[in-house]
Image (cartoon, rainbow, N blue to C red):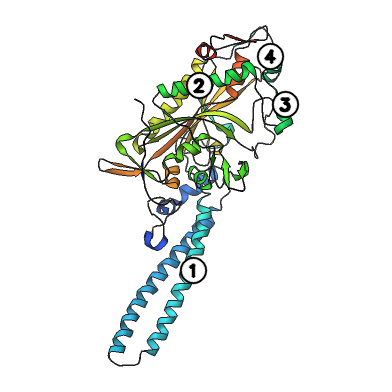
Amino acid sequence: MQIPFYEGKASGPLCFCACSEPAAKTGRDPAVLDRKYLRENRDLVTRAVALKNESVDIEAYYERDAERRAALQESEQLQAEANKANKAISELKKAGEDASAAIAAMKEISGRVKALKVRAAELDEEVETLYLRIPNVPHESVPAGGEENNEVIRTWGEPVERDFQVMPHWDLGAELGILHPERAARMSGSGFSVLTGQGARLERALINWFLDVHRAQGYTEVNIPYLVNRTAMTGTGQLPKLEDDMYVCGIDDLLLIPTAEVSVTNIHMQETLPAADLPVKYCAFSPCFRREAGAAGKDTRGLLRMHQFHKVEMVKFVTPETSWDELETLVSDAEVLLQQLELPYRVLTLASGDLSFAAAKCYDLEVWSAGVGKWLEVSSCSNFLDFQARRAGIRFKGDGTKGLVHTLNGSGLALPRILVAILENHQTPDGKVRVPDVLVPYLDGLEIIG
């Protein structure tokens, strides 16, 4: 059944951090992020930082947090002394006795309390800065190590040996007159593309078909902003770590989204969703913008790595007890697309060092590229547990239960690498391309490109 779009209940002002201290003392909501978990699981969190190769100074975080809590505790103790001193001063005055010494002591205590509160606020800011760079903890099933330790868990289809030389998509696209990287370069530089004619129509057909399939799978289609603020980017975990990869509109301090995940997840920023409505499932098409600042030396020819590309994204908001099952169905929802496009692919469990900052576990779907001769990632399906929900303040409530939702997202699918796979895997000996059967109705009956 398709979940209707609805307005959730707002949960209050947005914040990203909270403490074990009451909200009245910190101005923050303790439910958004409980630092108690970080304190009680120091070894686990420290190991997670190492496994994900994150650069945050985790020891500094724990030192500053301990100092901050000590300052708050001391200020509370002194405040209690001050309250007692106030009462004593009042009694001395009522008795007509000299209270000057008690008043002087009271002023000294008040000065110390004020200084401690100022120091606690300074430490709180330092702790918050460090906290935002602490990654999610990988699930115990995630293999340790870097990209070389990613585990292939299943494959579908077999790369077909051709009796002719398969052209890479950049050569085939040029011959067919549908791909023009040199024109894109003149107006935008490298990492951009111009598709024309049947190439542009093929990409549009894919997008429309992806969305139609996901709607049939129970996802509600949404149209979302492509520019978001820093609060939204921080909520889903892109900031502060990935700012160098962002395109920033400086005047308005808005950022172009690297994936629709950011906007779709933040649809319910600071809202409480009715438990009876979960899971809530959305799909969205968007362009994606990435500076690829950390991608030096990686394949950039043709359509393999772009600064701007199109993608359809699936996002789920689920209850904690169902999130691991929902991850498996999310992967299946993406796999259906590859199967119906008749593209050989494999599913990998990413190792900890290849896992994103916010994910607890991720499966990558890689499609075979016959012309390039390698596997290309076209979908990442991740379970973030409550990591994003804590930062973005997304909760659920109902039937006597309440808490933070678990969020998941997956590409369904990413272009233009699907274009690459179709052009190369469905290439014919005469230099044309067979259109997958499922796309023919979306191309007004067109069966051959070329």
Comparing 352 with 196, the one in front is 196
For marks 4 and 2, give the CA distance.
Answer: 23 Å
The percent position of residue 137, horizontal first and vertical second, equals 47, 43
Amino acid residing under circle 1: Val
- Residue at 28% across / 43% down in the picture? 401
Residue under pointer 1 = 118
Between disc 4 and disc 3, the foreground one is: 3
Query: Residue shown at 31%/89% (left/top)?
Result: 93
| Of marks 4 and 1, the one in the foreground | 4
Distance from label 1 to label 2 (Cα)? 56 Å
Q: Which residue is mark 4?
A: 176
Q: Position of residue 200 (x, y in %)?
A: 61, 20
Please tell me how crowded label 1 is: few (under 14), some (14-19), or many (20+) other residues with Cα within 10 Å.
some
- Label 2 SS: helix
Q: Is residue 368 visible?
A: no
In the picture, residue 198 is in which quadrant? top right
- Which residue sits at x=51%, y=10%? 437
- What crowding class fits label 3: few (fewer than 14 Cα within 10 Å), some (14-19), or many (20 or more)? some
Q: Nearer the viewer, residue 49 or 109?
A: 109
Q: Is residue 209 left or right of residue 404?
A: right
Above or below, comparing residue 215 to residue 101 in the picture: above
Q: Which label sits in the foreground, 3 or 1? A: 3
Q: Are marks 2 and 3 in contact (CB under 8 Å)?
A: no
- The residue carrying mark 2 is 208
Under circle 4, the secondary element is helix
